[in-house]
Image (cartoon, coloured by chain):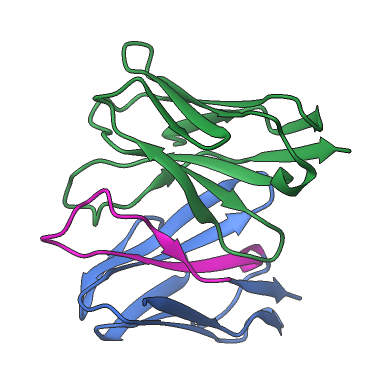
Amino acid sequence: SQTIHQWPATLVQPVGSPLSLECTVEGTSNPNLYWYRQAAGRGLQLLFYSVGIGQISSEVPQNLSASRPQDRQFILSSKKLLLSDSGFYLCAWRSGPGKSYNSPLHFGNGTRLTVT
Amino acid sequence: QQQVKQSPQSLIVQKGGISIINCAYENTAFDYFPWYQQFPGKGPALLIAIRPDVSEKKEGRFTISFNKSAKQFSLHIMDSQPGDSATYFCAASRNSNSGYALNFGKGTSLLVTP
């Protein structure tokens, strides 16, 4: 069966420090991968998606970046965190191209990031 | 801009009652409409989904009603239980080159009282 791992679960970082959040998926190949951010009252905001290794699309301009160094690995990074980067970050995957686009989106359990 | 608008923001229902959450969209290219359920500290999980070629889909106590002409869809939770207390998100996506990403509503916090 497929599983998605996301870490760390919680993180407290000072303003201006770097960030690296990692997500890995097991039990599937060539998935579409996504980073969402959830802020109170703002729902789930799509940040980045990837349809293949090295292919990253950004939905929202900001000081965050994403990378996909391996098929089932997705990393969210920042060189210098801002206070406004605080939030709940969720990694997700769904079946990739060639499969039903109605396949469910599977979320990890998220990382609660607090920038102080 | 918010492509899927969801209401209400919060909802309190007594045990055994019906919970109703509504969503509206503008993009007529959307062709997949799922609902997700999220418990505190967890990621959202798919609850039920519908495509626009049907007007209603029922799974147990959960029903999606879909009105294509009005560009609206809603979630009905029958015989609501305290265990249904969670945040519910509606979403929509289309078959496109945007990685089939889901566009979510802002969520509804449901509290079912005993």
| Residue B23 percent coordinates (x, y) | 50, 27
For residue A83, above or below residue B68: below
What residue range appears in magenta?
A84-109
Residue at 53% across, 51% down? A44
Q: In which quarter of the view is residue B52 placed?
A: top left
State the hue of chain B: green
Residue at the farthest left position: A98
Residue at 55% across, 42% down? B89
| Residue A32 percent coordinates (x, y) | 27, 67
Q: Which chain is blue?
A: A
Q: In this view, does B105 lie to the left or right of A31?
A: right
Q: Is residue A100 left or right of residue A114?
A: left
Residue at the farthest top position: B69
Of residues B78 and A4, which is closer to you in this image? B78
Q: Is any atom of residue A77 visible in this view?
A: no
| Residue A61 percent coordinates (x, y) | 41, 59
Q: In which quarter of the view is residue A74 placed?
A: bottom left
Q: Which image quarter is the N terminus of chain A in?
A: bottom left
Residue at 75% across, 31% down? B11
Q: Is residue A98 magenta?
A: yes
Q: Which image quarter is the C terminus of chain A in?
A: bottom right
Residue at 57% across, 63% down? B43
Of residues B65 and A107, which is closer to you in this image? B65
Of residues A77 and B9, which is closer to you in this image? B9
Q: How many tags in the picture?
A: 0
Q: Is residue B39 magenta?
A: no
Q: In which quarter of the view is residue A94 placed?
A: bottom left
| Residue A21 percent coordinates (x, y) | 51, 82
